[in-house]
C-alpha cells in the first residue's frame, strides 16, 4: 500500500480505507459512470501524457478532471474555470493557460506535497491513497466534520448524503450526483483493492481533534 507514516495524511488515509472496506457500487450513478468510462477510453492518451509529466496515475487525473469540469478540456484542472482567462474560483492566483495539458501539469504540481507524503507514482494502484490525494485536492471540509467525502466516495454505498453546495456552505440533505474518485477508478480499471486487515472498527467522531 501507499500508507503514509503518520499525521493528518495518515488519518485521512485510514478513514478512507475504513469507509471503502466492503463498499458496493450505488446503481444510481451508473449512467454518470458510463459517461465517464466512455470519456476515459476516448481521451486516455491525453491523460497519459500528463501522467508521465507529473508521475501520477492517468486514471486518477481523469477522475479529478471529471469531478472538476465533467472532462471539459477547455477548463483549468485546478477548479474548472475556462482556459484563456484569469481564474475566478479558488485557486485563482495561477498563470493564464490556453491549453489543457500545461494547465493540468501546473495544477497537479501544486499538490506535490501530498503526492510525496502518499508516495504516489504513475503506476500506483492503491485506491485509498488516490482517494486521499483527491480529498486533499478538493479540501478537507468533509473530513473535518467527520463525514465521508462525496468527491472521493460518491457512487458507492459508503456515501449517502451531504454536500458543500458552494464554498463554505454545507447541506446535510443534498446528495452529490457526480460519481466520486473511487467509483471512477473502478471503471477506469488498473487499480487494486486496498488491504483493510488490521484496521479498527469505525467509531463516531465525538469532537474534531
Image (cartoon, helix red, strand yellow):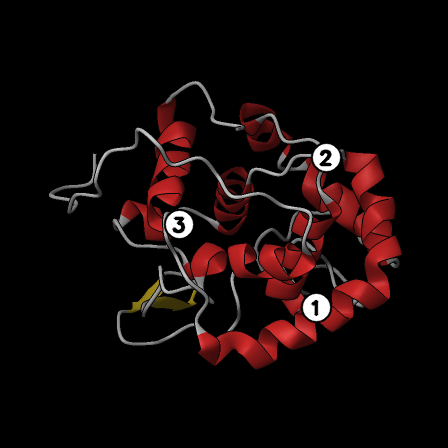
> Is 134 placed left or right of 108 in the picture?
left
Residue identified by numbered label 2: 123
Q: Residues within 10 Å of mark 3 (few under 14, many from 20)?
A: many
Secondary structure at badge 3 equals: helix
Which disc is residue 20 wearing?
3
In the image, residue 178 sits, relative to residue 138, either above or below, namely: below
**Position of residue 199 measured from the top left corner of the image (x, y, whole percent):** 30, 32
Residue identified by numbered label 1: 37
Q: Residues within 10 Å of mark 1 (few under 14, many from 20)?
A: some
Q: Residue furthest top?
A: 5
| Mark 1 vs 3, N-terminal side | 3
In the image, residue 167 sits, relative to residue 108, either above or below, namely: below
> Is 119 placed left or right of 53 in the picture?
left
> Is 150 placed left or right of 171 in the picture?
right
**Position of residue 110 measured from the top left corner of the image (x, y, whole percent):** 66, 37
What residue is at 76 percent from the left and 63 percent from the top?
40
In the image, residue 61 sits, relative to residue 115, either above or below, namely: below
What residue is at 68 percent from the left and 76 percent from the top?
35
Near-viewer residue (55 or 139): 55
Amino acid at each position: 500500500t501507499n500508507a503514509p507514516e503518520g499525521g493528518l495524511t495518515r488519518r485521512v488515509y485510514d478513514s478512507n480505507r475504513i469507509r471503502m472496506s466492503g463498499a458496493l457500487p450505488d446503481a444510481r450513478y451508473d449512467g454518470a459512470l458510463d459517461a465517464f468510462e466512455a470519456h476515459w477510453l476516448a481521451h486516455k492518451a491525453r491523460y497519459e501524457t500528463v501522467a508521465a509529466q507529473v508521475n501520477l496515475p492517468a486514471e486518477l487525473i481523469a477522475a479529478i478532471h471529471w469531478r472538476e469540469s465533467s472532462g471539459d478540456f477547455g477548463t483549468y484542472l485546478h477548479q474548472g474555470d475556462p482556459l484563456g482567462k484569469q481564474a475566478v474560483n479558488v485557486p485563482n492566483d495561477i498563470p493564464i493557460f490556453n491549453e489543457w495539458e500545461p494547465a493540468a501539469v501546473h495544477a497537479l504540481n501544486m499538490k506535490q506535497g501530498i503526492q510525496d507524503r502518499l508516495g504516489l507514482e504513475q503506476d500506483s494502484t492503491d485506491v485509498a491513497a488516490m482517494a486521499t490525494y483527491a480529498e486533499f485536492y478538493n479540501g478537507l471540509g468533509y473530513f473535518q466534520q467527520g463525514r465521508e467525502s462525496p468527491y472521493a466516495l460518491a457512487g458507492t454505498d459508503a456515501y449517502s448524503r451531504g454536500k458543500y453546495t458552494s464554498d463554505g456552505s454545507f447541506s446535510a440533505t443534498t446528495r452529490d450526483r457526480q460519481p466520486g474518485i473511487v467509483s471512477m477508478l473502478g471503471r477506469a480499471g488498473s487499480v487494486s483493492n486496498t488491504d483493510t486487515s488490521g484496521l479498527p472498527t469505525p467509531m463516531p467522531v465525538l469532537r474534531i481533534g
